[in-house]
Image (cartoon, rainbow, N blue to C red):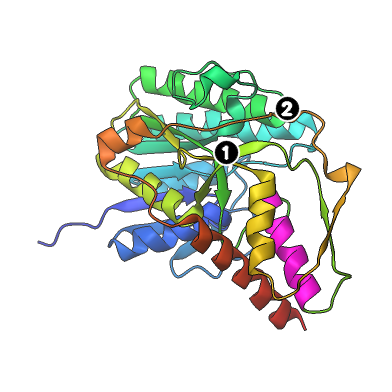
Amino acid sequence: MTERPRTALITGAAGFCGSYLGELLLGQGVRVVGVDRVASSGAPYRFESLDLRDEAAVRRIVAETRPDWLVHLAALTDPAAPAGDLYQVNVLATIRLLEVVQTAVPDCTVLIAGSSAQYGLTRPDENPITEAQLFRPVTQYAVSKATQDMVGGMASAAGLPVIRTRTFNIVGPRQSPAFVTAAFARQIAEIEHGLREPVIEVGNLAAQRDFVDVRDVARAYWLALERGRAGAIYNVCSGQGRRIQELLDGLLALSTVRDIEVRRDPQRLQPADVPAQVGSYDRLRADTGWQPQIPWEQSLRDLLDYWRASMNTEQ
């Protein structure tokens, strides 16, 4: 008899990280099932449109797929979203999902993808941030993700094999322009295609962040599933801090248009911005051997090329 292939159920499969993770797992011989609220993802594996707030639908998909791994990426990420929506999606839906898994497939390893936003305000001496860092979230989104993380910790203590990740600022092709990296890249691509004046609008360029390529993130999730410890918490990051100014300068240096004006847009400023956040991935490396592989310059180039191609498609 041939051994049944392992099955991974991915929530938020049509999203930025979900699309890369699904492709990676498929290439590893894993049977992939993706769910998301979108109608269709065009994914090369089974995909269903499903709202995690629909408990009956969640019970059905878990019972049908009986996953070996559940990667919970689905989340409402807009900091401006109503607080009630953030907690409904990021917290209450996670509680119900974990309850369903605990009942139907208690041996399923669950990876809950958290965010460095959970750490919030950190002092200079607290960087690089380890997994022991206290949470000081400064937005409702960050509070909702911190609560989701603690919900995962409770499920782990109750016996469900849960791994929690806290991923820092992700960069790479396919990213939504709601995020600063893609917002810059799209504006530059629009300028190159003559779709806007040679002016790029920016927010706070002084903030320091830890950027990690989305393809490295997908590989980190895969290795955490394969080699990580149940109950463990892992930072996913590059371990290097870069100011937003450096991000912008790197993209501008790749542009075919020179003398682009940089203009401050007050609406792009975050009402509660964290001055500096740099992570440590020592624990993830020790347990799984993971470390970032994609160079910073490649991440920027691939991101800008993605938006250039998008402009060509739209014209």
In the picture, which quadrant includes the N terminus? bottom left
Q: Considering only vertical position in the picture, is 296 above or below 159?
A: below
Please say whether residue 8 is one of the residues in the magenta stretch: no
In this rendering, the label closer to the viewer, 1 or 2: 2
Residue 259 in the image: state x and y as whole percent: 80, 67
Q: Is residue 113 visible?
A: yes
Residue for point 67% across, 41% down:
76
Q: Residue 29's quadrant in the figure? A: bottom left
Decide whether the magenta segment is chiefly helix, strand or loop. helix
Contact flag, marks 1 and 2 (Cβ < 8 Å): no
* 161 horizontally vs 165: left or right: left
Q: First in sequence: mark 1 or mark 2?
A: 1
Disc 1/disc 2 C-alpha distance (Å):
27 Å
> Badge 1 is on which residue?
55
Residue at the extreme front: 259
Q: Looking at numbered disc 2 in the image, what kind of residue is underneath it?
A: Thr
Q: Looking at numbered disc 1 in the image, what kind of residue is underneath it?
A: Glu
Q: Residue 193's quadrant in the figure? A: bottom right
Residue 182 in the image: state x and y as whole percent: 68, 57
Residue 57 in the image: state x and y as whole percent: 55, 46
> Badge 2 is on which residue?
139
* 97 horizontally vs 189: left or right: left
In the picture, which quadrant includes the C terminus? bottom right
Callout 2: few (<14), some (14-19), or many (20+) C-alpha neighbours within 10 Å?
A: some
Callout 1: few (<14), some (14-19), or many (20+) C-alpha neighbours within 10 Å?
A: few
Between residues 301 and 88, which one lies in front from this camera angle?
301
Q: Which residues are magenta?
A: 180-192
Residue at the extreme left: 1
